Image: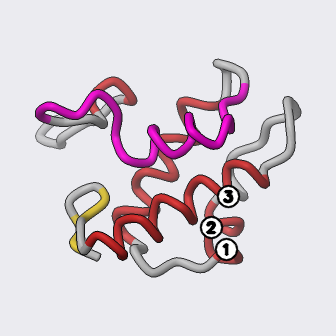
Amino acid sequence: VQGCAVTTIEGLSSGNQVLHPLQANLEAADAVQCGMCFPGMVMSLSAFVRDNPHASRPDIKAAMVGNICRCTGYERIVDAVADCLDQAREAGQSVGGIHV
């Protein structure tokens, strides 16, 4: 990873934000799962929302294929991601540096 920028889950929020918008929506939706897989899921989804500001629910579900967790279902997570994107679009703001 020499010469590359690496962001960890702790580095998602910036400035005065306590949580990245995606993290805040996941928390609000009570979509938190175990500590084993969830950080990886959050990182994958944060890149997804950054790169796909107009994603549909099927797009979100497809983006989660690489993350497997047996703790719970994924619907709350999909809801939280969709809400995050909807809120950003309604406010004319960005998620992860991409203006939506």
Would you say residue 98 sits in the magenta stretch? Answer: no
The part of the image, by quadrant, that contains residue 92 is bottom left
Callout 1–callout 3 Cβ contact below 8 Å: yes
The boundaries of the magenta stretch are 15-33
Which residue is at 60% across, 79% downward? 56
Q: Which residue corresponds to mark 3?
A: 78
Q: Earlier in the sequence, mark 2 or mark 3?
A: 2
Tag 1: residue type?
Answer: Arg
Of residues 4 and 69, the one nearer the viewer is 69
Q: Tell me, yes or no, whether the highlighted magenta stretch contains residue 32.
A: yes
Q: Are marks 2 and 3 in contact (CB under 8 Å)?
A: yes
Front position in the image: 23 or 58: 23
Q: Toward the viewer: 20 or 83?
A: 83
> Looking at the rendering, which quadrant does residue 18 occupy?
top left
Pointers 2 and 1 in contact (C-beta within 8 Å):
yes
Q: CA distance from mark 2 to mark 1?
A: 5 Å
